[in-house]
């Protein structure tokens, strides 16, 4: 009778083991066997080792040929503070599961020439993923378009900025302290290129920074942060973007020559990316 009871208990436990995902099977260093790592009821790995960069757009071809794509610019800012894996996933063309997102060490959402106001299917899918990440307190950093998509995902609203384009090297003013801006002065310079804005904040979110061209230059909610400017864009990239779009911007009456002359290197951007790793990603592991 005792033997029968033990078999029944063993059978009852079996379905729990069947929930193990292939990603939970780690190949041992000697490559002779698989080591099954069981952590908790969610079957998560004990250490979150990869930052995922969600790619939402493409750099201009002439810029990409010299500097690489958006993920390359962001990775240069995250290194060497983040020494482990950085994975790029294109949300427009790849199928990304919620499981991948909530088990990431951190998420960075790139900029894009697209507009959040288009409400394209891939944008809606990505918003759902971001909402799940924030719900699970996964650190998220949205940059420009990513900042707007994050706000929309959390219940905010994005619209055309009534102030028009914000371009070139701008001044950003800190409105309240946040670890994302550790070691930065109350006013710092950053590079920007956008015409949309977060017109309505998500409920419970806080504004951390503003600029002359945007009242929500940065916001935060839980472990998520958004920046309307581009901490990953250096002087050369910013200058190249202005030059390549000169004829289009001139139609809107923008003095591109003046903007080009005022473009600067913005070391504060690299500090912001490092702070995201140091104060958000590494504390989440």
Image: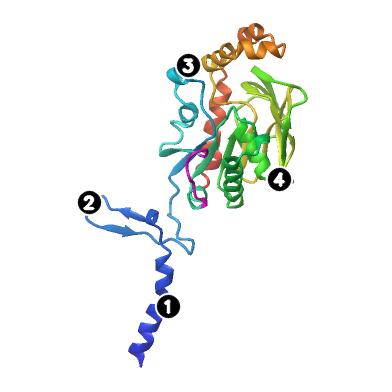
Mark 1 packing: few (<14 Cα in 10 Å), some, or many (20+)? few
Residue corresponding to mark 3: 62
Mark 4 packing: few (<14 Cα in 10 Å), some, or many (20+)? some
Q: Is tag 3's residue or tag 1's residue first in the polypeptide sequence? A: 1
Q: Which residues are magenta?
A: 91-98
Mark 2 packing: few (<14 Cα in 10 Å), some, or many (20+)? few
**Residue 24 in the image, given as x and y percentages of width and height:** 39, 56
Disc 4 on helix, strand or loop?
loop
Mark sitting on residue 107:
none
Mark sitting on residue 30:
2
Mark 3 packing: few (<14 Cα in 10 Å), some, or many (20+)? few
Q: Nearer the viewer, residue 22 or 247?
A: 247
Q: CA distance from mark 2 to mark 3?
A: 45 Å
Q: Is residue 175 shown to the viewer in this render?
A: no
Q: Residue at x 67, y 45 (%)?
A: 154
Tell whether 117 sits left or right of 277: right
Q: CA distance from mark 1 to mark 4?
A: 42 Å
267 within the magenta span: no
Disc 3 on helix, strand or loop?
helix
Q: Is tag 4's residue or tag 3's residue first in the polypeptide sequence? A: 3
Residue corresponding to mark 4: 155
């Amino acid at each position: 009778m005792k033997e029968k009871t033990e078999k029944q208990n063993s059978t009852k436990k079996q379905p729990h083991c069947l929930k193990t995902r292939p990603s939970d099977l780690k190949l041992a260093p000697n490559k002779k066997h698989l080591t099954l790592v069981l952590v908790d009821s969610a079957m998560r790995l004990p250490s979150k080792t990869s930052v995922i960069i969600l790619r939402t757009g493409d750099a201009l071809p002439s810029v990409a040929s010299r500097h690489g794509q958006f993920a390359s610019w962001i990775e240069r800012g995250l290194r060497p503070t983040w020494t482990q894996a950085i994975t790029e996933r294109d949300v427009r063309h790849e199928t990304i599961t919620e499981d991948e997102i909530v088990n990431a060490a951190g998420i960075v959402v790139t900029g894009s020439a697209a507009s959040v106001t288009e409400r394209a299917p891939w944008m809606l899918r990505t918003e759902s993923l971001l909402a799940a990440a924030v719900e699970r307190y996964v650190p998220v950093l949205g940059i420009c378009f990513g900042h707007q998509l994050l706000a929309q995902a959390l219940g905010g609203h994005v619209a055309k900025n009534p102030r028009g384009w914000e371009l070139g090297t701008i001044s950003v003013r800190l409105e309240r302290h946040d670890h994302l801006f550790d070691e930065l002065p109350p006013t710092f310079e950053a590079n920007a290129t956008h015409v949309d804005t977060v017109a309505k904040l998500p409920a419970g979110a806080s504004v951390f920074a503003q600029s002359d061209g945007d009242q929500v230059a940065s916001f935060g909610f839980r472990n998520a942060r958004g920046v309307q400017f581009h901490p990953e864009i250096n002087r050369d990239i910013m200058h190249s973007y202005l030059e390549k779009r000169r004829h289009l911007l001139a139609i809107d009456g923008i003095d591109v020559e003046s903007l080009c002359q005022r473009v600067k290197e913005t070391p504060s951007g690299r500090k912001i990316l490092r702070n995201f790793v140091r104060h958000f990603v590494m504390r989440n592991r």
